[in-house]
Amino acid sequence: MYYIITVMWISVQRRPAKRRRTAVALDPYEKRAAMHKAMALRLRIAAATHDLAATAAIAERSMRQFADTWNTSVAREVAEHPDLAELNAQLDGYYDDPGKR
């Protein structure tokens, strides 16, 4: 049992060797291609950011419509139920500004 745990611990402790980069001279065409790839990556990131902003704008509109619908239904339910309407009037009188009375 001790041997198995020791072997497992040793295997966990070993780390793979890091790759070493070798200096490679790039010709002007390869440099230009690498630059264009980097620019394309930057533009893809910008496009994804704008796509996320557009999705957030649509979600904001949907949430506002949901909140308006919810508030309308709650107001309708309170108005249709006589006890709730009376309670609402009492609470309005209790929480209103004392100078209005």
Image (spheres, rainbow, N blue to C red):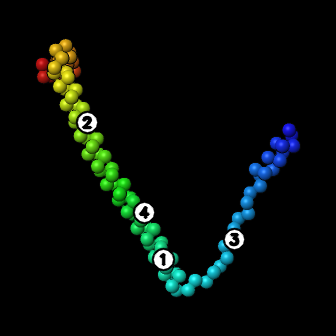
**Crowdedness of circle 4 by 10 Å Cα count: few (<14), some, many (20+)?**
few
27 lies left or right of 16: left
Q: Residue 101: which quarter of the image?
A: top left
Amino acid type at image mark 3: Arg
Q: Name the residue under label 1.
A: 35
Amino acid type at image mark 1: Met
Q: In this view, does 13 lie above or below 26?
A: above
Amino acid type at image mark 4: Ile
60 lies left or right of 82: right
**Crowdedness of circle 1 by 10 Å Cα count: few (<14), some, many (20+)?**
few
Q: What's the distance in space between the residues labelled 4 and 3, CA to CA? A: 29 Å
Residue at 86% from the left image edge and 40% from the top image edge = 2
Lower position in the chain sequence, tag 1 or tag 4? 1
Q: Are marks 1 and 4 in contact (CB under 8 Å)?
A: no
Q: What's the distance in space between the residues labelled 4 and 2, CA to CA? A: 33 Å
Q: Mark 2 points at which residue?
A: 67
**Crowdedness of circle 3 by 10 Å Cα count: few (<14), some, many (20+)?**
few
Callout 2 secondary element: helix
Q: Mark 3 points at which residue?
A: 20
Callout 3 secondary element: loop
Lower position in the chain sequence, tag 2 or tag 1? 1
Residue at 35% from the left image edge and 59% from the top image edge = 50
